[in-house]
Amino acid sequence: MRQVVRFVLERSLLLLAGAVTALVWANLWPASYGAFAHATRFAIDDIAMVFFFALATKEIVEATRPGGALSSWREAALPLLAACGGMVVPALLFVGAALAFGHAELLHGWAIPCATDIAFSYLTARLIFPAGHPAIPFLLLLAVADDALGLIVLAIFYPSGPLSTLWLFVLLGPALAVAWFLRHRRVASFWPYVLIAGGLSWAAFYAGGLHPALALVPIVPFMPVRESYHELFDEHTPSADDTLNRFSAWWHAPVQVILFFFGLANAGVALSSIGPATWMVAGALIVGKPLGVLLLTIVAVAGGLRRPGGMTYTDVMIVGITAGIGFTVALFFATAAFPPSPVLDQAKMGALLSFVAAPAAIVSARLAGSRSRTPRPPQP
């Protein structure tokens, strides 16, 4: 039973179960589902999802520390540029389609196809590439950079209400001061960071008009963390006994439960809700992601950067297709971009359909044959 639970948690299957349950519920009993979603969405999207974005921030913090995968510009530049391409091109495709087909009302959703679901993309890459293939860490770095840029986009372009810099300054300043004081005093427990500094930060974001789900993003970097770095998703690395990693270990399972309820509260749309926003979101993710990742990688290599040893442009394209799985973050961006409406349901359906990127990546790898499955020695 313990192995089954671990299998479910490590593969984010609770999120998938929540989304499937929501789809069935919304189509069989739409009235009761609508009442449930309306009653729970604030608690789930604005409060509970704080911890999902906190864990995403934890990965970014570790990756940018000395020895981390993004610790120097030489190591981070190529996947960072690839991530930019994987955000800019889908956004441009979305905007271009909205203007070309006369759907200007959809323009506010331009950031939805910028998203990459790091967990499902990683799991898909593990099915495609053998252990030790450079495409796997490349995808992880790309997804981490995508998450970091996505948090910035969410904060700047999708405020939850009218911006109030006064309340933001009045409450966020003390939150950061408390976090700094706790770190300065070497407080080992993560609870004061979460409850005191995080509580003030949540109030600042909420009152200031920013999305409160990002409340722990400025607090997490203050949590003490060890100097050495471990690979993301490395199950064989022993857990560190520091504040940030204890926070991550404690919240890992609860966040999976939170994701179940996030999928349950947000993924329930009528199957008849397919419309222009659906195809624009899904198309921009499935087509725009690989094009953007490949294009910026080619430009970066032409500019003097080097691909990881043994990684071909075919591998880069397959990584880009895999990164087209938007799912969790795309759903979240959709709820931030549009109010409850048929347009929101269409956009959510597009985020759900981005799962097509997983079998598309697997089939593409199969068609490419062993060239995309066998690591090669570094290029001279």
Image (spheres, grey):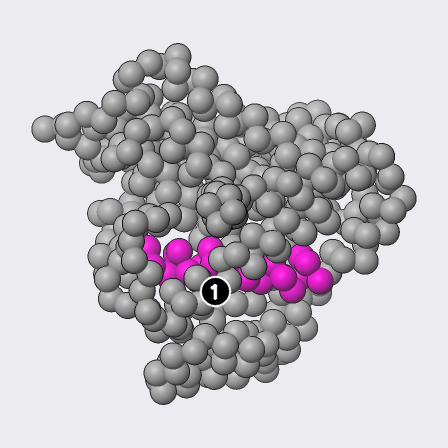
Q: Is residue 47 magenta?
A: yes
Tell me where residue 333 appears, x and y as whole percent. Answer: 62, 47
Residue at image point 55% right, 57% down = 255
Q: Quadrant of residue 276?
A: top right
Residue at image point 40% right, 32% down = 125
Tell me where residue 27 appears, x and y as whole percent. Answer: 82, 34
Residue at image point 33% right, 61% down = 239
Residue at the outermost right position: 31
Tell me where residue 380 appears, x and y as whole percent. Answer: 10, 28
Front residue of 109 and 71? 71
Overall secondary structure of the magenta section = helix
Front residue of 358 and 314? 358
Q: Which residue is mark 1?
A: 250
Residue 237 relative to residue 358: left or right = left
10 Å neighbourhood of mark 1: few (<14), some, or many (≥20)? few
Say which amino acid is labelled 1.
Trp
